[in-house]
Amino acid sequence: MSELARSIEHLAEAPVVCVGDLMLDRYVHGRVERISPEAPIPVIRVERETSMLGGAGNVVANLAALGARTRFASVVGDDDAGTRILRLLARDHGDTDQCRIIREPGRQTTVKIRYVANNQQLLRADSETIAPIAATTADALVADLRRALPAARALVLSDYGKGVLQPHVVGSAITAARAARVPVVVDPKGTDFSAYRGADVVTPNRRELGAAARMPVSSHTAVVAAAQRLIETCGFGAVVATLSEDGLSVVQADGTVTHVAAETREVFDVSGAGDTVVAVLAAALAGRVELVKAARLANVAAGIVIGKVGTAVVRASEITEALHAQEWRDREAKVLGLDEILERVARWRRRGFRVGFANGCFDLLHPGHIHLLDQAAAACDRLVVGLNSDQSVRRLKGERRPVQSESARATVLASLASVDAVTIFADDTPIALIEAIRPDVLVKGADYRIDQVVGGAFVQSYGGRVLLAGLAAGHSTTATIARMTG
């Protein structure tokens, strides 16, 4: 989590070009206290109204909140809604010189009006023109994109199916981006993804993925298969499938598959969550963050934005705070009882992971401990640490030990990247714990012989390995305490 948090600084000033369908999102907020006498419908008492950029405009708003430098191109109608959008861009985007918004006569700007009461949407009313933009308008957009791309490090195509991203615009944009070596991130629409052929990343939701691949997507395995079908048939570099409460799946052309679990949060409104994912992905890629890390950042951002009401944005500071909070939760989640440890080990083994085990008092953690645990982690896929309880340490080391309580020692161990789980045992030796876990690798310091390692013979009896880790000279808890008290 700390490593992800450090990646966020790369989002600031990242140069991104965005083109797509721009719309106006209006929210009518109020209270519902009765049912209409005219029909079985709620009566909303209107209290306030708000307007904000929607569609590709919400992607741009999220990019701005992240601190990215964004150039934006789109089309609106020559109407009141179009004028309102231009005012919002001037207010929220700041540098309107970086906005190329063409007003097309006869076109109706898309407006979505959502009626909200008690943090729940009651009704949505849309007015819009759904038709390809004129050829002259498309040529003007393409010309602007070609001028903008050499200075960019990511291109976003935000397709809401309203007509801005007609085939000529999409094809020309992807061709120009590839020539400029700029990664293309597409938020797709419709069932024919061949229109986005050659894009580096596409971000369909589960329903869109299934419809485009013409395959079931009810399970994680099915999602991966459908994504691989699209990669093969459309030449995508990767598919980042957004799966709502199931998180994200990142499927890459080289066969790498990564699943990112959803952030558990209370859901108030999912409007615009996909825009947030696309914006964070694009800004991260423009900041030279590799794809899986970018997807993890996007997943955290999506978890934040669904906890807000209305089309909302996520700021870089909010992602940082969420990552730090998650890190503390993860540390606590690593400290487990025996039953929880055994369940987790069973899950790891079902995924083909080799499980390692190390144990000790780990009082006043020092470089020697870190050196041993790093070697242990390198020898397996998942490392469990058995920690002597306070009573056990007193029996082994004397009444003045431990210096730190078992809770403090467990928390410090759980904060280490090399440690995947910590469990506290009260016996003088960890033999019962070793027999329950049956580790593939048992690790002890090189100051022991293999025949002296508790549980060594047992682990070797079923084909496990005993590793004697090298010691870092000059470090011990006893010596540290002696220096402190001497």
Image: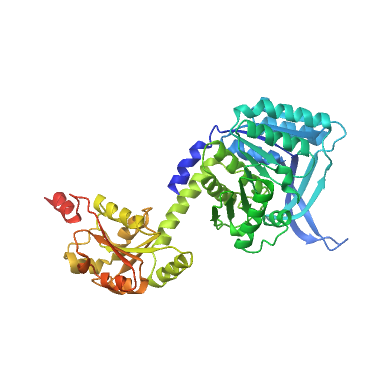
Q: Is residue 332 above or below residue 155?
A: below
**Which quarter of the picture shows residue 43?**
bottom right
Residue at position x 22%, y 61% in the image: 402
> Residue 360 placed where, x, y %?
26, 63
Q: Nearer the viewer, residue 78 or 140?
A: 140
Q: Is residue 179 left or right of residue 457?
A: right
Q: Is residue 451 left or right of residue 31?
A: left
> Residue 50 placed where, x, y %?
72, 42
Q: Is residue 205 above or below residue 175?
A: below
Residue at position x 17%, y 56% in the image: 478
Q: Looking at the image, can residue 88 be seen? A: no
Q: Looking at the image, can residue 317 be seen? A: yes
Q: Nearer the viewer, residue 436 or 305?
A: 436
Q: Is residue 313 above or below residue 466?
A: above
> Residue 290 placed where, x, y %?
52, 43
Residue at position x 62%, y 30% in the image: 180
> Residue 32 placed where, x, y %?
75, 57
Q: Is residue 346 left or right of residue 253?
A: left
What count of labels does the image hold?
A: 0
Residue at position x 20%, y 55% in the image: 477
**Which quarter of the picture shows residue 246?**
bottom right
Q: Is residue 458 left or right of residue 318?
A: left
Q: Residue furthest left?
A: 486
Which color mode does the image show?
rainbow
